[in-house]
């Protein structure tokens, strides 16, 4: 009851201050051009899928060092698990699980993470490394809520997160340096440099984060490096090459409910890619080649060296009849070696995937856009998979849009599921169908933007570990039927005050780990002269967690509902200098996201940011 009172008071104060402000004459135009929903730049209004966009400024306002926790603040229907001040971790006690509309897996293989359109997962486990995505490298993030397998294949069954990195846009040098220090000896240092002259642009960054952790033997440190170079070959063609590497070391004592079992993780992950993009008057597309590589060393006597290499070719043709047709081709090879001497298990496998797809959009009467597409994907183990999509958008006016779509998602089993832990080489791909309708509305000269979505998801063939009998074995035994609503609002009250809120409700046919039934996120950003204040709240109701107190009979249970209040106060005494203080969990709430891992109480960070 006390938590709900806090939430009501904060809402009242925010809206009271907002509506007392003078209504501005200047309209606030929100950038609704997205690339993730079609692979080329297109208005969000004509994409039948639910696509959210988060700007660099919005991510920075949260004070988050990592990108993924910031997603909860701005995107409905998504939840990311955490277990410490820093460090998501891996293995059964890890976090960094991403749930969309009640769909998730462990490790996370149902939500595809991209960096500039390139997949970020490895060959053995098939999951991204959550700790590698730092906010200093980001220009914006685009999220598809719901299956995007038509464009991105297997791991996009639940949705897609596309992290779009910074690009130097103005001639000359730009340097950004920053650092912070806070509770639990938590430290962050970063530096970025950008350069542009004529047709050449470059961007590079180095980040280092470390923390002693919330309790003994939960320390964490990571160092990231990233570099990107772009060159305009001609008016129609441009090339971009990049390279990134991340190395982290983390310790874990296990759940507090069980005897301490020290566990160490030493991981190095990197990726490189080359893109050749083209843009003509009536056509645009690209050619991409990428290579992800990694080494994983765990104190449980596990070692792996795996990779993921791929080629993508796509082109969109814009016809005078109002038709857009996108065609594409993809090739992937992923695999590697893994050795777990503790269970006497050795794997050396690789899998190939080939895919072709076509996606068409037809605009009728300048208001109605009909979309349809089909993907044919061939997996060297599972054979062919057909993935259709159909949808429409209707612009009732310049400020009102309705959407509807039906789309299929699928996920092929990973090498780990097939051959390593509780293995079953006879597993088949998971499949689901998503039905949704959306309403997008702008009011008050685009100062107020609303989005309401209702969806129904039906899936089968879900992969679960079955025990007894022992030894445990993965089986295609699961099915689900999820329904829910997602609502988000952005309101530019005046030039100094901006509000953002989202709400999601999820009705599950069966419990799903890290999928809360109700979630409310509210943030307010207020600027006065040199000062900036950001206040954010989160309310989570009925969050399911995995209780492993009895390894022979694990159970799924809910955690107590919780309410969080965070604040960030910054000042710019000089144009180039920002100093700030972050306060997290200001109500000192006791809560858990992973069973047996109490989260930090009230904690602070102070820091600076210099832009030259």
Image: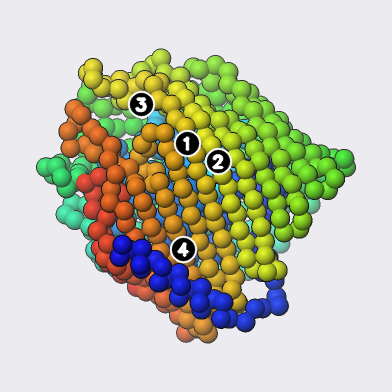
- Name the residue rendered at 45%, 69% in the picture: 11
Residue 522 is marked as 4
Q: Nearer the viewer, residue 116 or 438?
A: 438
Q: Position of residue 235 (x, y in %)?
A: 79, 52
Residue farthest left in this picture: 259
Distance from the alpha carbon under mark 4 to that under mark 2: 22 Å
Cβ atoms under marks 4 and 2 closer than 8 Å:
no
Q: From the image, tell me which residue sits under label 3.
A: 464
- Name the residue rendered at 70%, 51% in the picture: 401
Q: From the image, tell me which residue sits under label 2.
A: 455
Asked if residue 81 lies left or right of residue 259, the reply is: right
Cβ atoms under marks 3 and 1 closer than 8 Å:
no
| Mark 3 vs 4, N-terminal side | 3
Q: Is residue 587 visible?
A: yes
Q: Position of residue 512 (x, y in %)?
A: 37, 37
Local packing at callout 1 (Cα closer than 10 Å; few below 14, some 14-19, many 20+) is some
- Name the residue rendered at 62%, 65% in the picture: 448
- Name the residue rendered at 45%, 54% in the picture: 72
Distance from the alpha carbon under mark 1 to that under mark 2: 8 Å
Q: Nearer the viewer, residue 456 or 570?
A: 456
């Amino acid at each position: 009851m006390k938590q709900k009172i806090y939430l009501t008071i904060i809402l009242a104060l925010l809206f009271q201050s907002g509506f007392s402000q003078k209504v501005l004459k200047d309209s606030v135009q929100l950038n609704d051009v997205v690339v993730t929903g079609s692979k080329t730049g297109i208005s969000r209004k004509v994409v039948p899928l639910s696509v959210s966009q988060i700007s660099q400024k919005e991510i920075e306002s949260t004070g988050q060092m990592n990108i993924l926790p910031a997603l909860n603040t701005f995107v409905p229907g998504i939840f990311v698990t955490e277990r410490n001040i820093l460090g998501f971790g891996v293995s059964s006690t890890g976090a960094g699980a991403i749930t969309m509309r009640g769909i998730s897996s462990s490790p996370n293989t149902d939500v595809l993470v991209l960096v500039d359109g390139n997949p970020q997962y490895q060959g053995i486990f098939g999951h991204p490394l959550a700790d590698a995505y730092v906010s200093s490298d980001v220009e914006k993030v685009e999220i598809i809520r719901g299956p995007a397998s038509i464009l991105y294949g297997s791991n996009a069954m639940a949705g897609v997160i596309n992290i779009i990195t910074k690009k130097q846009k103005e001639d000359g040098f730009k340097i950004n340096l920053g650092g912070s220090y806070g509770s639990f000896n938590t430290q962050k240092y970063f530096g970025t440099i950008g350069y542009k002259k004529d047709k050449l642009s470059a961007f590079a960054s180095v980040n280092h984060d470390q923390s002693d952790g919330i309790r003994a033997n939960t320390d964490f440190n990571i160092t990231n490096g990233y570099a990107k170079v772009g060159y305009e070959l001609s008016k129609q063609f441009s090339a971009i090459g990049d390279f990134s590497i991340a190395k982290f070391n983390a310790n874990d004592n296990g759940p507090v409910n069980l005897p301490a079992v020290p566990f160490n993780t030493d991981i190095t992950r990197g990726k490189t890619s080359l893109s050749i993009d083209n843009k003509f008057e009536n056509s645009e597309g690209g050619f991409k080649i990428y290579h992800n590589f990694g080494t994983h060393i765990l104190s449980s006597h596990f070692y792996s060296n795996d990779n993921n290499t791929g080629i993508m070719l796509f082109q969109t043709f814009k016809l005078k009849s109002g038709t857009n047709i996108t065609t594409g081709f993809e090739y992937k090879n992923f695999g590697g070696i893994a050795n777990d001497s503790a269970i006497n298990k050795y794997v050396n496998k690789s899998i190939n995937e080939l895919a072709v797809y076509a996606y068409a959009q037809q605009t009728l009467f300048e208001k109605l856009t009909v979309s349809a597409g089909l993907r044919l994907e061939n997996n060297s183990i599972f054979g062919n998979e057909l993935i259709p999509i159909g949808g429409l958008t209707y612009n009732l006016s310049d400020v009102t849009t309705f959407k509807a779509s039906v789309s299929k998602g699928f996920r092929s089993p990973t090498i780990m599921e097939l051959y390593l832990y509780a293995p079953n080489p006879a597993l088949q791909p998971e499949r689901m169908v998503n039905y949704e309708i959306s309403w997008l509305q702008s009011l008050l000269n685009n100062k107020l933007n609303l989005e309401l979505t209702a969806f129904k998801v039906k899936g089968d063939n879900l992969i679960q570990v079955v025990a007894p009998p022992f030894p445990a074995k993965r089986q295609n035994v699961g099915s689900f039927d999820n329904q829910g609503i997602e609502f988000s609002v952005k309101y530019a009250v005046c030039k100094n005050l901006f509000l953002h809120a989202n709400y999601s409700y999820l009705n599950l046919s069966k419990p799903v780990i890290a999928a809360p039934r109700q979630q409310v996120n509210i943030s307010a950003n207020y600027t006065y002269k040199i000062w900036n204040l950001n206040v954010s709240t989160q309310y989570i109701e009925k969050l399911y967690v995995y209780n492993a107190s009895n390894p022979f009979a694990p159970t799924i249970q809910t955690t107590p509902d919780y309410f969080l209040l965070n604040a960030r106060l910054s000042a710019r005494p000089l144009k180039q200098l920002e100093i700030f203080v972050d306060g997290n969990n200001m109500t000192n709430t006791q809560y858990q996201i992973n069973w047996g891992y109490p989260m930090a109480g009230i904690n602070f960070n102070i820091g600076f940011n210099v832009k030259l």
